[in-house]
Amino acid sequence: MDDNLANPAPLGLMGFGMTTVLLNIHNAGFFPLSAMILAMGIFYGGIAQIIAGIFEFKKGNTFGMLAFLSYGHFWLTLVALILLPKIGGVAATPPAFMACYLFMWGLFTFFMFIGTLKANRCLQFIFLSLTILFFLLAVKDWTGSKLIGTIAGYEGIVCGFSAIYLAMAEVLNEQFDSDILPIG
């Protein structure tokens, strides 16, 4: 392992966090879905997390590799699910089936949360809140409840900002060689 590699986690956390905040501002009902959210999903939520995951692999961090590669591909598949029916030739995913997709991501995230129990409190919060977010979104699609969708949006904003916080804590704490922002 090369100890001279930079920490790729802040890149992955920022890609996840910023994209999650922006999508959930939409889910909370503030703005319609737009090209801005889809572009963030492809390039920052998707590709940047995939790059971070590849570098976590190089560092020998199985958890970080699996998390960033998986969630990077989550964003790419989510954008594809939205765009492919608009491009043509593919039917839109029915809400109940979309709920299954979100439930599976929630299940995966729950197991990843268990993996954080030996990590810092901030990472635990990110994965717990993301588990809740996926399950809320699944329930919204199963029930058609606009209220649950709005609650999920607010919860997703908190989840995304917690990832942004951890990313910046890791960068600033390393930069200043001090605990500028606590991560527990």
Image (spheres, rainbow, N blue to C red):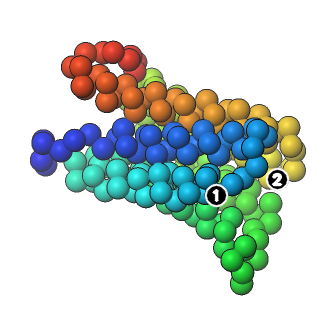
Under tag 2, what secondary structure? helix
Residue 167 on image: x %, y %: 40, 33
- Give the amino acid at mark 1: Ala
Residue beneath the point at 61% across and 62% down: 79
The numbered mark at residue 35 is: 1
Q: Residue 180 in the image: state x and y as whole percent.
A: 33, 15
Query: Residue 17 at x, y = what percent?
Result: 51, 39
Residue 122 screen position, x and y as percent: 46, 26
142 up-or-down from 89: above or below = above
As helix, strand or loop, the secondary structure at mark 1 comes to helix
Q: Which residue occupies the foreground of this view, 108 or 130? A: 130
Question: Residue drawn at (39%, 57%), measured in percent from left and top?
Answer: 50
Q: Quadrant of the C terminus?
A: top left
Q: Are marks 2 and 1 in contact (CB under 8 Å)?
A: no
User: Is residue 28 among the parts visible in the rendering?
Assistant: yes
Q: Is residue 147 above or below residue 125?
A: below
- The answer to whether residue 128 of the structure is visible from this angle is no
Residue position for label 2: 142
Would residue 73 be found to the left or right of residue 136 on screen?
Answer: left
Q: Could you say which is closer to the camera, residue 22 or residue 55?
A: 22
The CA span between labels 2 and 1 is: 26 Å
Q: Nearer the viewer, mark 2 or mark 1?
A: 1
Q: Residues within 10 Å of mark 2 (few under 14, many from 20)?
A: some
89 vs 77, left or right, is right
Taking the image as shown, residue 44 lies to the left or right of residue 151, namely left
> Which amino acid, by three-letter code, is at mark 2?
Trp
- Of callouts 2 and 1, the N-terminal one: 1
Quarter of image, res 120: top left
Disc 1: CA contacts within 10 A as few (<14), some (14-19) or many (>=20): few
Res. 95 mark: none
